[in-house]
Image (cartoon, rainbow, N blue to C red):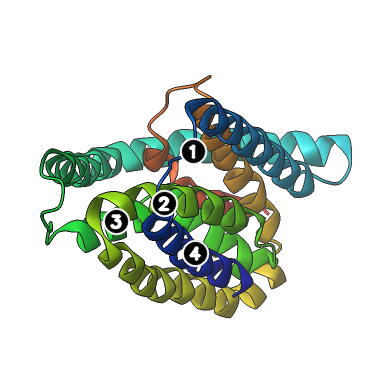
Amino acid sequence: MIGTALNVAAIVAGGLLGLGVARQLSHARQVLLQRALGAFTVYVGLSMVWAGLNGRPLQILRQVLILLAAMTLGRWIGRGLGLQKRLNRAGAWARSRFQQAQQSPGQPVPDGFLACTLLFCVGPLAILGSLQEGLLGSYRTLAIKAAMDGLATVVFARTFGWTVILSAVPVLAYQGTLTLLARFLAPFLYDWALLDSISATGGIVICCVGLVVLELLRVDLSDYLPSLVVAPVITWMFR
């Protein structure tokens, strides 16, 4: 679980840095880091898609059609379950606690730990990165998430105090559990040749995450998460 370990270390390091450093990163440096992380996220997503699409031209065409069907059906399911709406509500609650802390400097905000935990755990990168490491053995997505969470923790620590560092514990438990579960399922998915469809579908979602970070795209990413389940099911049905 290298990716989850990196994520936990980044949260702890970001929290300590936020508590110990008086000055914050300049806006120009924040924008530069945002663009670098966004560009690298797009690269990781496209490389996953490329790895998932292989074989002869007709096989690749079949895989592309399955990918499009999985993304479409997954989005319908995600919208029906209201995944993005639930995520938006959680994010709005966390932002309200952050704004409350900024308006009351020096006063403790008891919900700081929970707010940071929600922000670090409910996003699509937490799920996609953990599944990617467990199924494919790659921790690149979680490394990107670690960089994002670490930078965010620097700001949160200056606002909420040392309690933000404790959010590393639920991140470890949540992402570690997903990674171990995915690792347990990997042999079965490999035997049925279903990993390529999961890789390609996850790559599309991760690529969209990068475009959102770069502010080039606005899309309800969480609504597409069911596609990770739909893609291998369609592949198995039409194998």
Q: CA distance from mark 3 to mark 2?
A: 12 Å
Q: Which residue is mark 1?
A: 25
Relative to residue 104, is residue 5 depicted above or below? below
Q: CA distance from mark 3 to mark 4?
A: 15 Å
Foreground of the two, 1 or 10: 10
**Rendered-image quadrant of the C terminus:** bottom right
Q: Tell me the mark number nearer the camera, choosing from 1 and 4.
A: 1
Look at 61% across and 39% down and name the residue there.
Answer: 37
Q: Which residue is mark 4?
A: 13
Q: Badge 3: few (under 14), some or many (20 or more) residues near its Cα, within 10 Å? A: many
Q: Secondary structure at mark 4?
A: helix
Q: Badge 4: few (under 14), some or many (20 or more) residues near its Cα, within 10 Å? A: some
Q: State the image coordinates of residue 21 (x, y, percent, origin top left).
A: 44, 53
Q: Badge 1: few (under 14), some or many (20 or more) residues near its Cα, within 10 Å? A: few
Dot placed on the residue nearer the N-terminal end, 2 or 4: 4
Foreground of the two, 237 or 181: 181
Q: Which residue is mark 3?
A: 116
Q: Which residue is mark 2?
A: 154
Q: CA distance from mark 1 to mark 3?
A: 20 Å
